[in-house]
Amino acid sequence: MDDPVDHAILAALSRDGRATLAQLSETVGLSTSAVQSRLKRLESRGVIAGYQAVLDPEAVGVPLSAFIEITPIDPGQPDNAPELLEPLTEIEACHSIAGDASYMLFVRVTGPRALEKLVNDIRAIANVRTRATIVLQTYYERRPVLAAAAD
Amino acid sequence: MDDPVDHAILAALSRDGRATLAQLSETVGLSTSAVQSRLKRLESRGVIAGYQAVLDPEAVGVPLSAFIEITPIDPGQPDNAPELLEPLTEIEACHSIAGDASYMLFVRVTGPRALEKLVNDIRAIANVRTRATIVLQTYYERRPVLAAAAD
DNA sequence: GGTGAAATCGGTGAGCT
DNA sequence: AGCTCACCGATTTCACC
């Protein structure tokens, strides 16, 4: 499970998700079909969960992002905020966290007005308190998890 | 810039980053070469910033993730924490934020011990105070920014 | 934006180590 | 088992209409 070749394949694909078998086989030093069988194994085992194009948020019209912490108003009742909030497509990520709040969301919206509406929707839908922290600038995000190993 | 066809291409690629021109041309109802020229335009304009394989964090050995808020100890001096911290590969994202703290990091590590070491490294490197919030469970993340438009 | 031809790529099976 | 090699359908790429 900690095979260095698999590791190299994963590192390469997390940097260029459209890398071809030929490119991968060159970087790892195996034939394309050897790479292919490893790839299929990694995909079927779920190590590779999928492939995504990374879009520029500003270019696609959602230049404003924010973190929203969520706290249940009534701590006694069953809490299924993640499912309730799932239809809100502005929410990019939802984690439960240890700390004052129960959940941490990361959201992207068109602007301040849309953020206000989103926060109100969240409060109404999940019966929660919210604390939004606006992102002023994103220096980097979605950096690859794996480091590229030197030869 | 708000072309519905481009929008559909982007939506499809953010769900399946390895979609072929043939698949894309079917979903948008154009020929493959028309899709291709649009794709190249979207890539060269930076609307598509790149492609990534999405890896299962647990399967690649970083099951623990956390948010780390960063506050400068000395508010008077020049602050280039994002550049200073960039070599720390455990940091997946770095945003500057409005609020008590200056920056919000999202990090992935192998476990609590690695988190402790990372926090110490961050403090030492950037001369900052930190506040870490551990992620207990991730319900979803990296959800596509664009909704798939109905016909 | 569409068409068509050449280069390249992905997928499968036979044979080797 | 895992890898290499050879083959063929699919895909990408690039001219041109």
Image: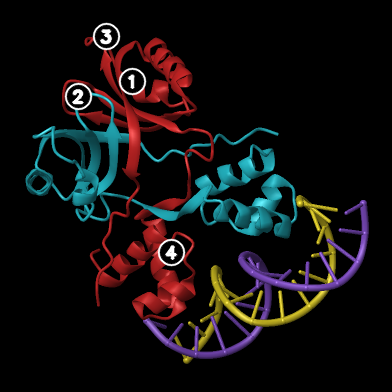
Chain colours: A cyan, B red, C purple, D yellow
Q: Are marks 4 and 2 on the same chain?
A: no
Q: Read off the residue under disc 3.
A: B73
Q: Are marks 3 and 4 on the same chain?
A: yes
Residue type marked 2: Asp
Camera-nearest label, 3 or 2: 2
Q: Read off the residue under disc 4.
A: B40
Residue type marked 1: Asn
Q: Residue at image x 27%, y 53%?
A: A59
Q: Position of residue D7 (x, y in %)?
A: 79, 78
The answer for how far apart the CA atoms under marks 4 and 2 are is 46 Å
Camera-nearest label, 1 or 3: 3
Crowd around label 3: few <14 · some 14–19 · many ≥20 (10 Å)? few
Check the image and report above or below for B114 versus D1: above
Q: Secondary structure at mark 1?
A: loop
* Disc ID at residue A100: 2
Q: Position of residue B115 (x, y in %)?
A: 43, 20
Crowd around label 2: few <14 · some 14–19 · many ≥20 (10 Å)? few
Residue type marked 3: Ile
Residue type marked 4: Lys
Frontmost residue, B66 versus A18:
B66
The answer for how far apart the CA atoms under marks 3 and 2 are is 23 Å
Q: Chain of mark 3?
A: B
Q: Read off the residue under disc 1.
A: B80
